Image (tube, rainbow, N blue to C red):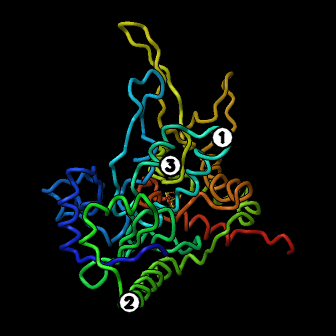
Amino acid sequence: MGQLYYISTEEWAAFLNDILLEWYVYAPTRQGKKLNFEHITVNNIADIELSTYRASQPIKSFLLFFYEQITNITKFPNVRGCAVMGLKGCDLNSLETYDKMYLEGEFAEPFYKRRRQDLVLIGSDCQEPIETCFCTVLGKMPYPEEYFDINLSAINSGYIVDISSERGEEFIKSKKEFFKKIVDRSILIKREAKRRASIDVVENINRHFDIKAPFLDLLRQTLTSEVWDEHAKTCVTCGGCTQICPTCHCFLIEENKNRKDHAVSKFRHWDSCQYTGFVRVAGGANPRKKRHARLRHRYLHKFDYKRENYGFDACTGCGRCVEVCHGKIDMRKVFSDLKKARVCPNA
Ligand code: SF4
Ligand code: SF4
């Protein structure tokens, strides 16, 4: 836990109003039944919805763009002075995967590295989980525990403000008078009660699936199960589950030639292991031609290979893939069916 403050909702709105000249801020606002990240101006501060559930877009949209030029760029993209608010634990936890993939090892991806250093990450507790949420199945909590610069926990017509980094301090520095040091610690007990209530809601939502991570052994024992074929039947290979997933990180490089000067530039865009040609090689061979093989691969990549190699699952239980799937494939139901179909190795 970092430095703790309290701020009323009115003061938070006034604070935002004052800093918008210096900071470029994104926050969730409601569009129909969905919450989408919007650029915040003085005109839509009142529309910000911080404490319900996660926004539709994953955090990766701000860190590794869907499509961007990566060579022959005249100016390196700069996000200094940019903040994203309303990030739930299930978004922030995806940075465990992204940091591992793009910052560690011999080569740190420069675009990701720059944005990761500069972007101010403002989390908020999820106080209204929805039917597709399953963070607790993965041993995660419906509130940010790490990876945030500032976290807001809605309470008593205001927020407990948890500042956990220098970037967070920098963000509030110019208007620190809005933030009151917490002297009455009973407010923290209230926050614990609210957090416990959210955990209970998520656990209740998922009770009938009767599943709990890690899934590595279950997957290895059910590689040839018919459950994969059954669930893959409704997959339309749209790739939506991977595009919307905060931890999916595969990309494709393409080269484009400028018609005028014939200069060649490279572009990177997100890719999907659910596309038919994802692993097709020269000569046409395709080891994952069948839908069930691609579906199974997605699960193995997240819950077997990542756990085996790095000790964590590349899934945060955000439920976006459940929500977006045209084939109504629910990861929880797949695991639940695999569990029933499992042949006990000692039987
Ligand atoms: S696999 Fe699904 S639930 Fe897990 S992080 Fe990706 S979108 Fe969220
Ligand atoms: S979102 Fe559903 S239908 Fe689309 S590729 Fe993923 S599993 Fe298949």
> Is label 1 in a helix, a strand or a loop?
loop
Label 3 neighbourhood size at 10 Å, few (<14), some (14-19), many (20+)?
many
Q: Which mark is residue 242?
A: 3
First in residue order: circle 2 vs circle 3: 2
Q: Looking at the picture, how far across and down is residue 182, in whole percent? A: 35, 83
Q: Is residue 277 above or below residue 141?
A: above
Separation (CA) of disc 2 from disc 3? 37 Å
First in residue order: circle 1 vs circle 2: 2
Q: Is mark 2 within 8 Å of ligand 1?
A: no
Separation (CA) of disc 1 from disc 2? 51 Å
**Which quadrant of the figure has residue 133?**
bottom left
Residue, far left = 43
Label 2 neighbourhood size at 10 Å, few (<14), some (14-19), many (20+)?
few
Q: Looking at the picture, how far across and down is residue 128, in whole percent? A: 35, 76
Label 1 neighbourhood size at 10 Å, few (<14), some (14-19), many (20+)?
many
First in residue order: circle 1 vs circle 3: 3
* Residue denoted by label 1: 288
Q: Is mark 3 within 8 Å of ligand 2?
A: yes
